[in-house]
Image (tube, rainbow, N blue to C red):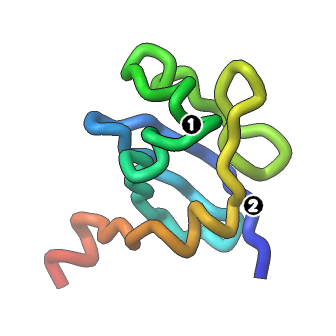
């Protein structure tokens, strides 16, 4: 199942908070990718923080992207504060 990304927010330590079209919010750790091409080009916080959503996935300047299915499969759910307090 292919789910588009609706929003992305860069976090410290090369993490991304993602919202998918099904309403799920998840956190993706990009650090394992940063030693491989083409992701070495986004391995500085200044560049990493330029992330944006285009065509249902996340992209950076220079046409660097990560497939939405990778973002979903390799991320963990974000639990909201209201869910924690239940």
Q: Pointer 1 and pointer 2: residues touching (CB < 8 Å)?
A: no
Location of residue 25 with respect to 31 vertically, above or below: below
Quadrant holding the C terminus: bottom left
Residue occupying the far right of the picture: 55
| Circle nearer the viewer, 1 or 2 | 1
Q: Secondary structure at mark 1?
A: helix
Q: Secondary structure at mark 2?
A: loop
Q: Residue at x 75, y 60 (%)?
A: 4
Between 80 and 18, the one nearer to me in the picture: 18
Q: Quadrant of residue 12?
A: top left
x and y, in percent, of residue 45 in the image: 37, 22
Left or right, 77 with reference to 71: left
Q: Residue at x 52, y 53 (%)?
A: 18
Q: Residues within 10 Å of mark 1 (few under 14, many from 20)?
A: some
Q: Which mark is residue 57?
A: none
Q: Which mark is residue 39?
A: 1
Residue occupying the far left of the picture: 85
Location of residue 34 with respect to 17 vertically, above or below: above
Looking at the image, how many numbered discs can be counted on the residues?
Answer: 2
Q: Earlier in the sequence, mark 1 or mark 2?
A: 2
Q: CA distance from mark 1 to mark 2?
A: 20 Å
Residue occupying the far front of the picture: 36
Quadrant holding the N terminus: bottom right
- The residue that disc 2 covers is 4
Q: Residue at x 60, y 38 (%)?
A: 37
Q: Quadrant of residue 62?
A: top right
């Amino acid at each position: 199942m292919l789910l588009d990304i609706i929003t992305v927010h860069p976090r410290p330590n090369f993490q991304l908070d993602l919202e998918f079209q099904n309403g799920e919010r998840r956190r993706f750790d990009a650090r394992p990718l940063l030693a491989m091409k083409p992701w070495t080009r986004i391995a500085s916080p200044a560049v990493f923080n330029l992330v944006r959503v285009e065509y249902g996935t996340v992209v950076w300047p220079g046409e660097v992207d990560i497939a939405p299915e990778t973002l979903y499969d390799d991320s963990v759910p974000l639990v909201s504060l209201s869910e924690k307090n239940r």
